[in-house]
Amino acid sequence: MALDARFLSILTCPVNKLPLRLATKAQLGFLNRHIAEGRVQRSNGQPVTEPWTEALLREDAQVLYCVDDGIPVLLPEEGVGTTQFTDFPK
């Protein structure tokens, strides 16, 4: 389920209030490959075990937030830092 553009335009990161944008297919593919390999952790240290079908990426490309059934999960502890990867596609 795609997010409405007007809704997306007002979403910001709950930590630093930077704007969020939809992650690209390449970014989601990269993330899901690493999830399948068991190499992805949330900000709270818990592993991500299920693939993501949609995500929001913070403007500075440092954090991803899952979109679950069209609902953004904007909890700081649920974010996935992209700095855990050396080659995350920007």
Image (cartoon, rainbow, N blue to C red):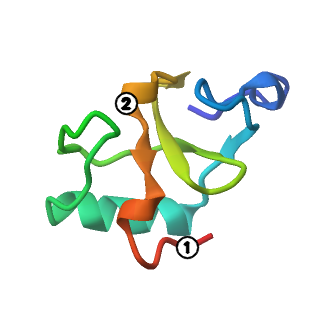
Disc 1: CA contacts within 10 A as few (<14), some (14-19) or many (>=20): some
Check whether the beta carbons of the residues at disc 2 and disc 1 lie within 8 A of each other.
no
Identity of the residue furthest to the front in this view = 16
Nearest the viewer among 62 and 67 is 62
Q: Marks 2 and 1, how far apart in space? A: 20 Å
Disc 2 residue type? Glu
Residue under the image location 41 percent in, 68 percent down: 30
For label 2, the SS is: helix
Side of 35 relative to 37 (left or right): right
The residue that disc 2 covers is 78
Location of residue 53 in the rendering, given as x and y in whole percent from the top left corner = 42, 45
Report how many numbered discs are placed on residues in the image: 2
Q: Residue 38 placed where, x, y %? A: 14, 59
Residue 39: percent from the left, percent from the top?
Answer: 20, 61
Q: Quadrant of residue 24?
A: bottom right
Going 38% across and 69% down the picture, which residue do you hit?
85
